[in-house]
Image (cartoon, rainbow, N blue to C red):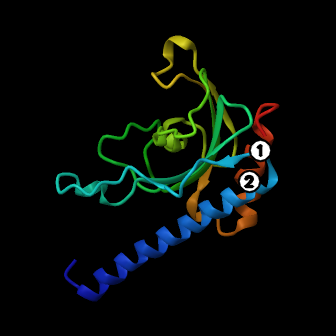
Amino acid sequence: MTDGPAMLNALRDVQRLNQQVAQLLKTAEQYLVAESNLRSVKGTRAAGRGSTSLNDPIAWTPGYAARFLLTPDPHIITFVSVVLVDRPNDSFARPFTEPLVSAGWLRFESAVDPNWRHWGWAKMAHWTDHPPDGTMSDRVIPKPQQDESGCSRQRCASLPLVSVRSAPQLIEGLLEPLLASLPPGAS
């Protein structure tokens, strides 16, 4: 890009996008806390997969942003995420073609630590091959296939980020289905 003002405007567009994603996640978290027995994981961290290293400049832009919420069931954690961009070594089930907003829950064999650090699960919408049309997909993971986290079940739905233009669309399209899909005792 050789046009300095155009470059500045492009960077400001990225800042505005980040503000909108933050507002989407705040709205989702406020709704889920108000409508259920979910509670936020401590802190305000949202961005994932970022870097400040000169050796990894592609990761200067966060790959995703997410909020995690604990459920009354100590084995289940919920999330709302926006997967913004893929990385060269990401392994997704389908080609990355656009940012997605997703909501889901994960069940673990052991109780979830409130200081939970498995942020990468927020990209689950791209690991699975379900369509990004708001349909909840369910995946049970047999014990021999579980990784070290002990995740035994995943449930997730996603929509293209550009299609979520209002709080009611977010609530009706992803958050109500998320709450309806939680197992008994988890909401």
Where 171 sits versus 49, above or below? Answer: below
Residue 170 left/right relative to 22: right
Residue plotted at (50% across, 11% down): 144
Which x, y percent locates residue 153? 62, 26
Q: Number of callouts in the render? A: 2
Which x, y percent locates residue 161? 57, 60
Q: Nearer the viewer, residue 114 or 51?
A: 114
Residue 133 in view here = yes
Q: Which residue is mark 2?
A: 33
Dot placed on the residue nearer the N-terminal end, 1 or 2: 2
**Three-letter amino acid code at disc 1?**
Leu
Q: Secondary structure at mark 2?
A: helix
Q: Which residue is mark 1?
A: 179
**Three-letter amino acid code at disc 2?**
Val
Residue 153 left/right relative to 97: right
From the image, which quarter does the C terminus lie in? Answer: top right
